[in-house]
Structure formats: structure tokens, C-alpha cells
Amino acid sequence: MELEGKFCIMGGGSWATAIAKILMMNGTEKINWYMRRPSQIEDFKRLAHNPSYLTAIKFDISRIHFYSNINLAVKNSDVLIFATPSPYLKQHLKKLKQDISEKVIVSAIKGIVPDENISVSDYFHKMYHVPMENIAAIGGPCHAEEVALERLSYLTIGCVNKERARSIAQKFACSFVKTTISDDIYGIEYSSTLKNVYAIAAGICHGQKYGDNFQAVLISNSIQEINRFINTAFPMIRNINESVYLGDLLVTGYSKFSRNRTFGTMIGKGYSVRTAHLEMEMIAEGYYATKCIKEINECYHVNMPILDAVYNILYEKVSPSIEIKLLTESLR
């Protein structure tokens, strides 16, 4: 199944910019690109790179049609690739009046829709009536910064329609990105969300001066928590050791590029949540994911001590030193 039509990237951040690079390296002749702020578009056209993110990536502007009007962008596109932070998705879609029920939706968002407490795929399915076979999710260990440097990366495309997943995977494969497919869209979405929570936990422990030995135990227990949760909420045959699950957790928990680990490190060093957000100037999606998953888990009652510890630190304002000390007694 060849995926025809015009592609539109929805968002102007680092991951959106990395995806644009991948598509254009793959040979996509022209892309549409929606950014909310006209000033960002004007600077982009003048500089031939994103003025705010991954500025080292140069683009052939003649191959990009920019939009600051979301309805025009959607009207003139067939495949919509959403790469906005999950807390801002509803805000971005507020001005959308165009029917998207027949579009192909690709979610590059690694988070849950706050307040709704549902995955991005479910949000588009329930709120915008997009059939599930037309919705895909991108997962895997793939930092935007390494895409900018053209370092070898791996992505998994999840969709209930494997032919649709395969056609999308072909568009995302290039000289430095290898792709694979899966029909486990929910497992990919929730694992991609949870790994941000555990990266915050890793950062908190790093800020508290716990060493590599403990970090290894923490990450080992984190993948067990992910496995328990997604197998309870969305049971199916899956291998949790695949890169889209375990690999994504590892890179987010350990990498210097991980904003969630950075956020957690600041919390572990004594920063308040508000101060950490202000100093980072970027969204740590794991902060929002912690509350969402905590509330979702009230229905499933999965044993998730690491999630609970992060929630207590971020939302109940429990001292990180006290909470992590208690956590160490429950890990094996």
C-alpha cells in the first residue's frame, strides 16, 4: 500500500524539525509545514533553518510550503504528522474547523492528552472520528538532536493496519533511520509516555547522587512496571525487550539529550517544579504524564512504585530524599 498525497508536519519544535529532515532526506519532493507563529515562519524562510530548534539543519525552502493557518494546512494535506508536546495538543487543535476524519494521522507525540487521560490515537479516533486503521504512532529510541547529526537511529511505526504501518515506515526510512512496523499502537503510545516518567525518576536519583549501580536497578524495575501496566491495560503478545519499549526507556533514562532526565535532575537537586520548568525553557512531558498515568491506573491498580514515588515528589511535594529512600526498599 503506497502512501500517496501531501504530508504536513504539525508543530515547530525540535522533533518536528527532525521529522522534516527525515522526510526530505527520504526524497519527499515537497512537504507542508504548519507552525502556529507567523514570525517563526518568516525567520525560517530568511535563515533556511528553524530559528528556535536544531538550527544546524539547513533546509531547501523551495521544497516547503509553510502555513500559520491550521485549517489551510489541513485542507491542503493528506497525511498529518503531529509533533507537538502532548500538553499543548488540544490548544493547537482549538482553531481546527476542517474535517480530518478521512486524513491519515501520524502521532509523533510521546504523551497522553491531559484532562482527557487518553492516548493521542484514541483522542483523534473519539473526538475527530478518524478510523483507527488511519492512525499511526511513531516510537523508539530516537532523539531529535541525533537525527540532526545524522547518527543512526531506529523507529517503529505502530498501526492496527500493518499495511498502513508499512507504507508510513517507508516514508520515514532514510540513510540514517531504520524503520520497523508493529500493530501494537497502544503499547507503543503508553510505553513512550511512561518512559518519560522513569527518565524523571532517573534524573531525580542522579540529582540525589545515587550512582550507576542504583540507576541500573531503577531502569530494570522501570521496564517491569511498563510491562505490567501495558499488559494489564492492553493485553496482547509483545516483546518488551524490543527497542520501541526497552530501547526508548534506556535512551530517555540515560541520554544527555533527555529533557525529562534533565528536569528530574533539577528536582533531585532541590529545584521546585516551577523553577525547573522555567530554567529548562522546554517541555518535560513526563511531568504531565505522571499525573495522567497515576489517574488512569486508579482503574487498573497495577503495582507501580516508581510512578507513585515520582508522583509524590512532583505533585504531593514530598522530599525527594525521603521518597527515593523509601523507594529503594521496594526495588529488586
Image (cartoon, rainbow, N blue to C red):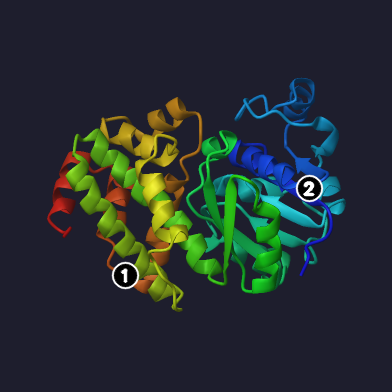
Alpha-carbon span between mark 2 and mark 1: 43 Å
Residue placed furthest toward the bottom = 236
Give the residue at mark 2.
Answer: 28
Question: Tag 2: Cα neighbours inside 10 Å, few (<14), some, or many (≥20)?
Answer: some
Q: Position of residue 24 (x, y in %)?
A: 74, 42
- Count every numbered label the image shows and give the total: 2
In this view, 318 is above or below 155 = above
Give the residue at mark 1.
Answer: 302
Closer to us: mark 2 or mark 1?
2
Report the disc number at residue 50. Answer: none
Q: Quadrant of residue 98?
A: bottom right
Q: Quadrant of residue 101?
A: bottom right
Quadrant position of the C terminus in the picture: bottom left
Tag 2 secondary structure: loop
In this view, 309 is above or below 264 = below
Q: Position of residue 316 (x, y in %)?
A: 29, 47
Quick one: 44 or 148, which is closer to the camera? Answer: 148
Quick one: 102 or 248, which is closer to the camera? Answer: 248
| Residue 277 visible from this viewpoint | yes
Q: Position of residue 76 (x, y in %)?
A: 87, 51
Q: Residue at x 53, y 63 (%)?
A: 118
Q: Amino acid at mark 1?
A: Val
